Image: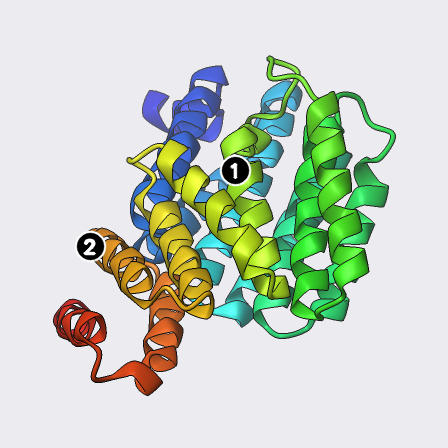
Amino acid sequence: MLQQVEESRPSRSTVAALKSTVQDFWRRDDESGGSSLRPAIVGQLRYAQGLIRNAPPGVGNDLRTLSAELARLAGWAHFDARQYSMARVYFTQALNLAGDNGDRQFLANVLSSMSLQATYEDDPAEAVRLASAAQDTVRDTAHSARIMSMLHMREAFAHATMRDTVSCHRAISKAHTHFDQSQDDESLPEWVRYFDETKLTVDTGIALAQLGEYQRAVPLITEGLRRENHEQRRGRAFHAVWLATAQLRNGALTEACASAGLALDLTTTVDSPRVTRHLADFHRQLSPHARQAAVVGFEAKFRSAIS
């Protein structure tokens, strides 16, 4: 009987344990991708939501906040698995949960993820709309400069996809301006702390590569890769593919194959269909150079890794 009472009345220790689980999920996502984490994340989301109805007021609010984060994490994991319909389901759930708590900064974060997904789904106009809505949501909140920097970079990605040079460069400039105004301290929401100077640098390079400005993109992505945490294998694999693409477009075939080879090495411990799709796209771009020695070597490595 005592065990049933304890299980039906979640406490601060319950919240602390769930927070630790969420942090572990994000760490594992950074290291190895989110695809294989989906069942565990969805299970924790259902568990957290089931606790809310019997929770004391303060604990209940914390559980709603954690449920919103788990829903966003579930959306992100499905996005990384390229299961976009399910990703939208969980992102929408995260929006509803965050709206209940009135957390405008978190709402903006979810809209940011949805903007990135719209870019992947070849709907850059919707991506711009979502990024702009996120900016409006967070604009006059406290300590929002770092969040605004991230959101303007999302907007830049969408403009780059449309090859809107002026709007893309304007968004990049705003991203850097807001970043320079931000402070790296405890006032930052935990979920935006990943967006540091290294991430800003590499994302700027990727936006320029999407825009077709490959010569400017290469040194930025190279520098980002050099400075990144090597434990973040999924992100490094993703960035290495973008570097390879920019190098290829610059005519640096050998360097491009080497960078793509780094991405392949990283994918041996990464479960991310999104990264795999980028590698497959790069592989197709090599077909005009099929007889070159660097391409022959990469081809063998690619087929071995993908199989």
Q: Is residue 265 visible?
A: yes
**Residue under the point 34% across and 68% down:** 279
297 horizontally vs 182: left or right = left
In the picture of the structure, the residue carrying the numbered disc 2 is 265
**Residue under the point 61% across and 33% down:** 65
In which image quadrant can residue 117 be found?
Answer: bottom right
Q: Residue furthest front?
A: 251
- Could you say which is closer to the camera, residue 41 or residue 228? 228
* Quarter of the figure that contains the N terminus: top left
255 horizontally vs 98: left or right = left
Q: Percent x, y for residue 142? A: 79, 21
Q: Percent x, y for residue 285? A: 39, 79
**Residue under the point 72% across and 53% down:** 155
272 horizontally vs 100: left or right = left
* Quarter of the figure that contains the C terminus: bottom left
Q: Residue furthest top?
A: 186
Q: Percent x, y for residue 168? A: 74, 56
In the picture of the structure, the residue carrying the numbered disc 1 is 199
Mark 1 Cα-neighbour bin, 10 Å: few <14, some 14–19, many ≥20? some
Q: Amino acid at mark 1?
A: Lys
141 horizontally vs 86: left or right = right
Distance (Cα) linking label 2 and label 1: 21 Å
- Could you say which is closer to the camera, residue 240 or residue 12? 240
